[in-house]
Image (spheres, helix red, strand yellow):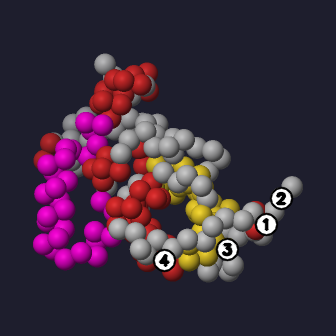
Amino acid sequence: MTDITDIVTPLVTLTALTVDEKRAWIFNVGVPFEISAEEFDDEVWPLVSNIWAKHNSRSPNAGPWISYLCRFAKRSPSSSRKEGVPSEKRRKTSVRPAGLCSAKIRVRRLDAGKRVRIERYNGSPDHEHSIEDSDKLKFPDAIKNLGPQAIQTARHRQHRRGARGEEWARRHCSESAPDRCGQYSA
């Protein structure tokens, strides 16, 4: 059996790429690649933190790793509302079906945490939606570092795009998975 540290993957730098190109690179990971841990932590992950949710982690000898699952995968269906709670006391939420996307990545820390290898996890498929749909669901951490005016501008753009991915869920469920989509089924 080949040790994971023996597999050669290209060490790349994403600093020359635009923000959109960096996000696209991590959104649908084609071939495994490595970048410095500093570049990953400071420049790349804050741009895609809204796309991925922690799924699993391990600490083997080859280096600790964390697998991430697309936020649209959502492990379990939304719970129903409690009866008898006045509408002014309810949180404003929307019901979103579970299991809408199966994309997963694995982020492995190498060389005592100096490098990061990013790869698909267990041959997972590409996302079944666009980056913009992920942006509607949640803002990336990079937005937290912006000033108030930039945040207001981003929220305005987000609002014009639609309400938190519901449109994508309706379209996706009616086309490909009506049996697992609850209220969005056709």
State the SS at label 1.
helix
Give the quadrant of the C terminus: top left
Q: CA distance from mark 3 to mark 4?
A: 14 Å
Q: Which residue is mark 3?
A: 110
Give the residue furthest to the right: 1
Q: x and y percent of residue 16 in the render? A: 41, 74
Three-letter amino acid code of the residue under disc 1 = Asp
State the SS at label 2.
loop
Kindly indicate the quadrant of the structure image that contains residue 49: bottom left
Q: CA distance from mark 4 to mark 1?
A: 23 Å
Nearer-N-terminus badge (3/4)? 4
Dots 4, 1 in contact, CB < 8 A: no
Residue at image location 36% in from the left, 45% down from the top:
130
Q: Nearer the viewer, residue 110 or 21?
A: 21
Q: Nearer the viewer, residue 58 or 153?
A: 153
Q: Which residue is mark 2?
A: 2
Nearer-N-terminus badge (4/2)? 2
Magenta-span inclusion, residue 141 = yes
Q: Which residue is mark 4?
A: 39
Above/below status of 129 relative to 32: above
Above/below status of 148 relative to 161: below
Give the residue furthest to the top: 186
Q: x and y percent of residue 22 in the render? A: 41, 64
Q: Is residue 46 left or right of residue 160?
A: right
Q: CA distance from mark 2 to mark 1?
A: 7 Å
Dots 2, 1 in contact, CB < 8 A: yes
State the SS at label 4.
helix
